Structures are given as C-alpha cells and as structure tokens.
Image (cartoon, rainbow, N blue to C red):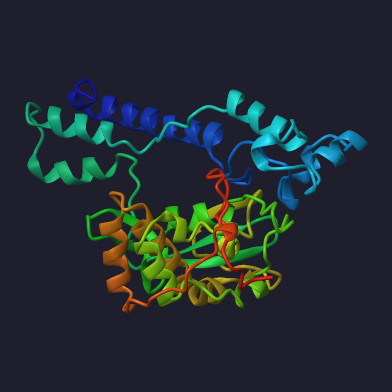
Amino acid sequence: MALALCSQTLWSHAIRWVKGGYIQWKNEYSWVNTPIICTVGRLRVLPKALQHILPKATPDDIERESEQTGQLYNLETTRASIWFDESVDNYERVPFPYDYSYEEAFLKQLGGAVIPESLHLPMKACLPTLNLEPGSNWFLRNLTDQEYIRMEAVVTPDDEATISLPGRKWLTLDILLLWVISWKADYRKNRKTTWSWEQLETFEGFTDRDVSDACQGPGYGPMCSDFWPIWVGPWAGHRLYVIIKERLDNGWKDRTENITRLAPKMLRVFYGRSLAMKNEHQEYWEEAFRQDGDQWKFRESSPFPWEDFDLDWDKPKQRLSRIT
C-alpha cells in the first residue's frame, strides 16, 4: 500500500490487483448456488434435498437407518454418517475477504504521503469493502425451490452493518440463515422430513409456562421434542443466494410473511433456550425479547413424570407432547 501511494499509475495498478483478489475469492469460495446445511454427526438420514448424493441403500442400510434400531448413541454407521464424517475431513474454513486490512494499511500509510486531503476520501472509496446502505432492500433467495425472503439493511445496537427481516432487527441474516439450513431428525417420533411452511404456521410456540419451566433448568427447556419443528429449517440442503433486491419472475414464491408470522415464536424459543442454559447469550436475547414488545408472566408448571424425560443428553428431551 505504501508503494501504491507513490504515484497515480501505481495506485491504479494496486486497486486493480486488490479488486482482482476479491473476484478470485468469490469464484473460489462463494457458497452461491451450492447446497448448504447446518447439522451434527451420527446422522441416520439427510434432508430430502441431499438424499440424492448418497449411494443406493442396501437392505443392511435400510435396517441400520430404521427408527427401530435402538438409541441414537448406539447407532451403527449409516450412509448419512459416512457422508458427514467425510465432509468434515475434507472441508476447509473459508477465509473472510472483507477484513479491512487494505483500508487499515491505507490509513496507516496515508499520513506519510504527500497527497492533498481532498483526495483522501475518494481514494479510500476505491478500496473494496462490504458496504450496506441502511434501508436498502435485499433478498435471501432459494434457488432450489424458487422462493425468497425479503430483507433490509440495518445497523445493529453494537454498530454492525448487516441485513435483517423487515421490522425484526434481531432476526439478522446469520440467525435466519442458520435456522433455514439447520437439520436434525426426530428419531423418537420418526420425523425425518422438515415441516412445510404451512405446517410451521400451526406451530404452537413457547408459552409463558414453557418460559417459566426454562428458568428452572435445561431439562425443561426448548430442546425437548415438542419444539423439534423450530430447530429444523425448511431449506436445509438447498442452494441459496443473498442479493440486492431485483425483479423476479412470476414463478418465485415470497416467503417473507411466513417468516414474519413465525418470528415471534422463534424468538420465544431462542429466549427460552438462553434462560435454560444461562450462558453469555442470555442478555442479548432478553434485549431482543424486550425490543420485540413481548413479555411473559411466571406460570407454575405441572410436575412431569420421570418416564417422560430422556436421560440421553445427546438428543432432544421428551416431554408431554403437544405436537403430532
């Protein structure tokens, strides 16, 4: 960067080189149009969108992947678990390109360069950065099912520029993305497919009694199987794309209203989870809960028979089921 500030010609060469590096990153590491999923090990099955990548099932595979095959921690190797283990071994962490290192170097060297102050801002603007205009409109697009969720650029309370669901500043892209791509089957109730958007509309959510229970310990928290649908995203294994708002063909389905109606229920579950775990994220979710205008009153819960609890802490806890 110090060399680039020596002349206009060197500056032009440096900017082309820097921008070329970002284009190379995009071509090599971008997740656009790539099936994406957030899941855990010891899988029996994959979501429907990814089942085509597995080898054809043998009779032994079918038996091992059956819901009748004992407890989760005793599972034999399955096609899905082999895929997961191989993926973990072969995948690599993607470097983040917009680390502001060029901008920091530019500002550091600028003080010693004989460059008119009037050129400082225009030169800084030449550097590639991730700039979001507050209020600008964006799409989270599902290229697999031709669906999309409308989003808008916001500035979070800690001054981070990002995009979120309109009117729900707490539901930022990272939270929403992790939700729609999350996957885990509910083996106890033999639920191996995600709920449709229409089914999610019927999700009861986290009541005041549930929040009260969560305060008493994780055994009462939102990881029980009652709330399994909220931990499984309908876009797990799909190909996604975040892009500034553009005109779409009539074949695209807008899922924004679905997410908007589901958001308060999601927030209650996430808030309840933080209460149950009592970790460093509790304050964040309490503030999001307050800003969303929600509130709750302590409700005494009925005692749960011991047989309704699953002592295997590696899978959701079993409670008196309200969801079939």
Depicted 1 relative to depicted 261: above or below: above
User: Quadrant location of the N terminus?
Assistant: top left
Lateral position of residue 260 relative to residue 158, left or right: right
The C terminus is located in which quarter? bottom right
Q: How far across and how far down the image is residue 208, in percent?
A: 40, 76
Give the side of residue 159 with respect to residue 19, left or right: left
Q: Can residue 221 be seen in this view?
A: no
Q: In which quarter of the image is residue 235?
A: bottom right
Which residue shows up at 68% across the image and 40% down it? 43
Residue at (76, 34) in percent of width and height: 78
Where on the picture, by quarter, is residue 109? top left
As displayed, is residue 222 above or below residue 122? below
Whether residue 15 is visible, yes or no, is: yes
Observer-nearest of 266 and 255: 266
130, 47: nearer the viewer: 47
Residues 130 and 282: in front is: 282
What count of labels does the image hold?
A: 0
Residue 172 location (% of width, % of height): 40, 59
Toward the top, the furthest residue is 3
Left or right of residue 86: residue 112: left
Name the residue rendered at 58%, 74% in the picture: 203
**Residue for point 61% across, 24% down:** 90
Rendering coords of residue 51 (x, y %): 77, 45
- Where's residue 114, x and y in %? 7, 29
